[in-house]
Structures are given as structure tokens and as C-alpha cells.
Amino acid sequence: MDQLGRRAKVDTSTAHEARIEFYQHLRDEELGRWREKPDDDFVAIPLSEHEVIVLNERTGGSITWVRGAAEQSTSFGAATARAYFEAHPARKPWHDAVDGELWLIRFSDYPNTDVSALAKNGTFVYNDHCCDGWADFDDDTIIAGRRIWPEKSDA
């Protein structure tokens, strides 16, 4: 109600669309589906971190895509597969670093330079020969990494 006690007018079509979107999103989550846009007929159903089924709900057609295979493709479901994999990047080994481990990591601004980094309190602590720094395990600027201590046989 407004200050004079009158009922506010509600755009029922917009409210109805919002409800449809909301309940569709809940149902998608329940069934393990992902869709890029609420009004999209294509959904991605993950089979693993690297594989999805893309289903056209309107026609029932489906295809399985593997991460990377849809990058340049214009085939059925490729756009949905690309969007899914972009929204769900693959986990990298350094994302699961454990405090106390020593890693060699590479940053995007110096892709040919390894920097030794200690995993500490959920971050990498490092000195890149000019200054001290830190980076979260999932920092987007880390492009490569490998654990050097403890060695796999020591773990």
C-alpha cells in the first residue's frame, strides 16, 4: 500500500515470469541440469568434470560433449557445452594444495617463469625475485603449477 492506503499496482506478467524462472531454476538444480539462460531449451547435464550431455528439451535430441571438443564447433549443442564448461572450469592440481606443501607455480604475466611458493593458510606465499606476494589457490592468474615437496612417494 502507498502512503494514502491504496494498493500498489503489480505488473502480473513480470511477476508470473519471475515465478516461472524461480521454479524452473529449483527444478533444474534438483535434476542436476544447468541452463545458460532461463528461456533456453538446451540444458547441460554433467556426467563428470570433463563431460556433459546437452539436451534439447523441446525436441528430446541430445549429444555428449567432452571438455574442449566444442571450442570451435557449430554442431548441435556446442554453444551450450562451451557455456557450461566456461561457467564450470576444470579444477587444477594446485586448487587442492595443502598447507605446508611447496609448489612451483607460473603466473599469466610471466608464463615462462616458475616461482616457488609455500602453501600456507589457504594461499600461496612466494617471492618472485623482486617482491613478496601471495595468491589464493584458485587465483585466475596462476596458469600452471606442480607440487615439488613433499614428493608423491613421500606423501
Image (tube, rainbow, N blue to C red):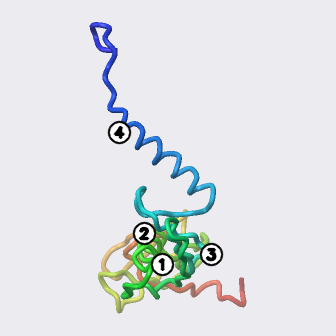
- Between discs 4 and 3, the one toward the N terminus: 4
Q: Is residue 103 placed above or below 3 in the rendered structure? A: below
Q: Is residue 61 placed above or below 4 in the rendered structure? A: below
The amino acid sitting under disc 1 is Ala
Q: Are marks 4 and 3 in contact (CB under 8 Å)?
A: no
Q: Quadrant of the C terminus?
A: bottom right
Query: Disc 4 marks which residue?
Result: 14
Q: Which residue: 53% across, 75% down?
A: 61
Q: Are marks 4 and 2 in contact (CB under 8 Å)?
A: no
Q: Which residue: 40% across, 60% down?
A: 37
Q: Between tags 4 and 3, which lies in front?
A: 4
- Between discs 1 and 4, the one toward the N terminus: 4
Query: Disc 2 marks which residue?
Result: 135
Q: Between tags 1 and 4, which lies in front?
A: 4
Between 151 and 97, the one nearer to me in the picture = 97
Q: Which residue: 62% across, 75% down?
A: 47
Query: Disc 1 marks which residue?
Result: 117
- Secondary structure under the numbered disc 1 in the rendered image: strand
Q: Are marks 1 and 2 in contact (CB under 8 Å)?
A: yes
